[in-house]
Amino acid sequence: MYYTVSKGPQGAPVLVLVHGAGGSRLLWPPQLRRLPGATVYTLDLPGHGRSGGPACDTVTGYAGAIVAFLDELGITRAVIAGHSMGGAIALTLALDFAERVAGLVLVATGARLRVAPAVLDGLHADFAGAVEFLNRLTWSEISPVLLERGRQALLEAGTAVLMNDLTACDRFDVMERLGEIAAPTLVVAGSADLLTPLKYTRFLAERIPGARCEILEGAGHMVMLERPVEVARAVREFLNAKNP
């Protein structure tokens, strides 16, 4: 898998950023990719961005790819930060590979990520139209630059990758297992998120033991791009407090 790394000081926590469906490492803002005081790995999942191989159609498949990535780099434990589908991957790692997870940062995600059948059907019938629809739901504080950036990212992912990703999301459900998570957890969300509404956030915060919750008023599903400084601050404070 393709990745970039921003090295922190000796002994700094290791943070791995995992993007969401149809995305790439570039959907994480520079404030997080180069977070002070941490060694940050920002990766492209298989079949995404500059990574080779096919996209997975299960969250478990992507979690296995992350474990292989950690093994290849000799990283025994890391804080896993995931956005949307990336958050589902992070949750799966915390549940099934707990020894590898020093902490969790769950951004705009949920314990279950059902996808409307009409969306999946629309990807085949009218890919450009479906992308336009999804992209409009993704943003709250819409700027022309961010809106176009999001649209291009989804179009570049292509039908097959987006279908696999959304199928993986639709199959994902760990609602009954959240109490098993032992890793320190930060949950971050925007109050205006239309794709993963606040009830998803509250469910995570209530069911994961000791979880912290940071809600940014007015932000949408791409909360880390709409409010990069605030999200970076929350993650930095979490890492400093937990020192995972």
Image (cartoon, helix red, strand yellow):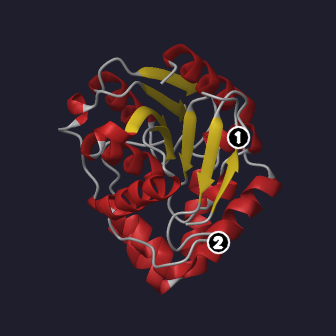
Q: Within 10 Å of the Cα at label 2, are there few (<14), some (14-19), or many (20+) other Cα atoms? A: some
Q: CA distance from mark 2 to mark 1?
A: 21 Å
User: Mark 1 falls on what kind of element?
Assistant: loop
Residue occupying image coordinates x 17% and y 38%: 176
For the N terminus, the quadrant is bottom right
The answer to whether residue 105 of the structure is visible from this angle is yes
Q: Is residue 31 left or right of residue 168?
A: right
- The numbered mark, 2 or 1, whose residue comes first in the sequence reads 1
In the image, residue 140 sits, relative to residue 135, either above or below, namely above
Spot occupied by residue 58 in the image (x, y as percentages of width and height): 32, 65
Question: Dot 2 corresponds to which residue?
Answer: 50
What amino acid type is highlighted by mark number 2?
Answer: Arg
In the image, residue 230 sits, relative to residue 43, either above or below, namely above
Residue occupying image coordinates x 23% and y 40%: 175
Q: Within 10 Å of the Cα at label 1, are there few (<14), some (14-19), or many (20+) other Cα atoms? A: some
What amino acid type is highlighted by mark number 1?
Answer: Lys
Marking on residue 7: 1
The answer to whether residue 192 of the structure is visible from this angle is no
User: Mark 2 falls on what kind of element?
Assistant: loop
Spot occupied by residue 131 in the image (x, y as percentages of width and height): 58, 70
In the image, residue 212 sits, relative to residue 18, either above or below, namely above
Residue occupying image coordinates x 37% and y 33%: 199
Marking on residue 32: none
